[in-house]
Every structure is written in C-alpha cells, then in structure tokens.
Amino acid sequence: MRVIAHFNKYVTNPLQRLWAPWLPYMAVIEHTGRKSGKPYRTPVMAFVDSKSVRVVLNYGTQSDWVRNVRAAGRPKCGTVAGATC
C-alpha cells in the first residue's frame, strides 16, 4: 500500500490538486511540513455536512499529511467544493 501512496504523492496528487477543490467528496488540505516548515496542499476525499468535514484516511494515520496536521494541531486551511476557509 505504501508503494501506491508514494506514487500518488508524486504523480496523482499534483493532477488532483487541479480539480479536487471543485468536486463533491473531494477537498484540498493546506498544511505545513512538520520538519521542513514548507507549505503543502494535499487532495483528499472528504464528506461535508453543515457542522463538520470528515476526511477519509486512505493510507492511515502514518501518511505525511496526517502527521503534519497532527503536529500543527490542525490544518491551516482547506478548500471543499469550491469554498475556501
């Protein structure tokens, strides 16, 4: 599974960042690298209701973006279905 995650990180994610903010069930999480301090934008599958955004952890809690968000306490911002926080 990590091989697929690595492929997606460098090949699929850059493409998905283009359309993910506009699709239902997709979002872009903006976060800061926990070691590098570099800003990142990661496309994710998300479900939104009036009170919350639920993000699918396809590759578990050891994904880099999840570890970055946990280290920061929360994502800086995100885009869900065309709306930016």
Image: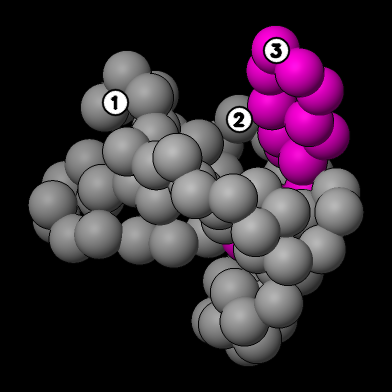
Q: Which mark is on residue 61?
A: 2
Q: Amino acid at mark 3?
A: Lys
Which comes sooner in the sequence, label 3 or label 2?
A: 3
Which comes sooner in the sequence, label 1 or label 2?
A: 2
The reply to whether callout 1 and callout 2 are in contact (CB within 8 Å) is: no
The reply to whether callout 1 and callout 3 are in contact (CB within 8 Å) is: no
Identify the residue at image location x=13%, y=52%. 37
Identify the residue at image location x=29%, y=26%. 71
Which comes sooner in the sequence, label 1 or label 3?
A: 3
Mark 1 crowdedness (10 Å alpha carbons): few <14, some 14-19, many ≥20: some
Residue 66's x, y, as percent? 50, 36
C-alpha span from label 1 to label 2: 12 Å
Residue 59's x, y, as percent? 73, 45
Identify the residue at image location x=60%, y=30%. 61
- For the N terminus, which image quadrant? bottom right
Q: Which mark is on residue 51?
A: 3
Locate residue 10: give its quadrant: bottom right
Q: Amino acid at mark 1?
A: Ala
Between 35 and 13, the one lying in front of the other is 13
Residue interval drawn in magenta: 43-57
Type of secondary structure dominating the magenta stretch: strand
Identify the residue at image location x=85%, y=49%. 25
Taking 12 as reference, is 21 above or below it? above
Between 52 and 73, the one lying in front of the other is 52
Mark 2 crowdedness (10 Å alpha carbons): few <14, some 14-19, many ≥20: few
Taking 28 as reference, is 6 above or below it? below
Between 15 and 79, the one lying in front of the other is 79
C-alpha span from label 1 to label 3: 24 Å
Visible residue check, residue 77: yes
Reading the image, the residue beneath label 1 is: 71
Locate residue 18: give its quadrant: bottom right
Label 2: state its secondary structure: loop
